[in-house]
Image (cartoon, rainbow, N blue to C red):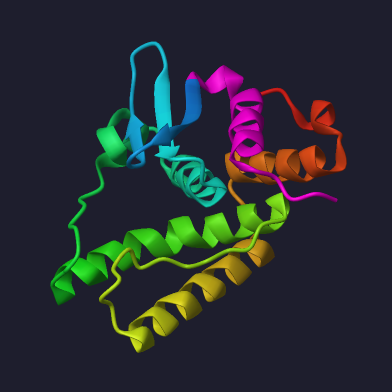
Amino acid sequence: MRALNHSDVARVFNLVFVDHKVVMNGGHAEPLYIPGVRIAEIQYRQDYAASALHEAAHWCIAGQRRRRLKDYGYFYSPPPRTQVDSVRFEAAEVEAQSMELLFSEAAGLRFQPSADDVDAPINGLDTFSHRILIRARERRRLGLPERAQKFVTALLNERQGNLGLAAGG
C-alpha cells in the first residue's frame, strides 16, 4: 500500500465529510479553521500531509460548539511560552496529536510529535510524546469518535484503492 500525500488526505476528507459543510484545502502559510454559515474551511500548511492530518484531528474531536468558533476557540500563545502557556498548549495538543498519530498510521505516514517550540527542552518533548502515545493507545482500546473512525476507515480504503466503499457522510 502506498502512503498518502497532502492532496490525497484533503480529497479523502472532503469526500467523506461532504455532508458536514466543511472543506479542507492546503497551500496556506499557517493552519486555520474558519467556521462558516454555509461552509466551514479547514486550511492546512503548505503541502504538508502532517498538517492536513493534524487539522483533521482538531476537527474530528471538536464538538458542535467549538466548530462554530474560529480556530475552534483555542487560545494560541506563540513560542517562547511561559510554563502556564506550555501546559495549556499541551493539554489541547495531546488530544489532537494522539488522533493525528492514528490518522498518520492509517495514511501510511510517519508521525512526528510537535511542541511547536524549537526552544522547548528535549526532556519536555519526550514527556509530551509519551503522553501522546498513551492517549493514542487509550483511543485504540476504547474506540474512536464516530467522525474520526470514519476518517481512519476512509484513509485505509484510499490506500487500498477502495475509497468508494467508505465514502458518504
27 to the left or right of 166: left
The residue under the point 19% across, 58% down is 78
Residue found farthest to the top: 38
The residue under the point 72% across, 55% down is 108
Magenta stretch holds residue 146: no
Query: Where does the image place residue 115, in percent across and percent down from the top left?
Result: 35, 68
| Quarter of image, res 164 | top right
Magenta-highlighted residues: 1-21
| Quarter of image, res 154 | top right
Query: Where does the image place residue 74, in percent across and percent down from the top left?
Result: 26, 47
Please count the marks in the image. Answer: 0
Judge by depth and name the residue closer to the eye, 61 or 48: 48
Asked if 108 appears above or below 166 in the picture, the reply is: below
Query: Where does the image place residue 113, in percent across and percent down from the top left?
Result: 47, 68
The residue under the point 59% across, 20% down is 18
67 to the left or right of 49: left
129 to the left or right of 37: right
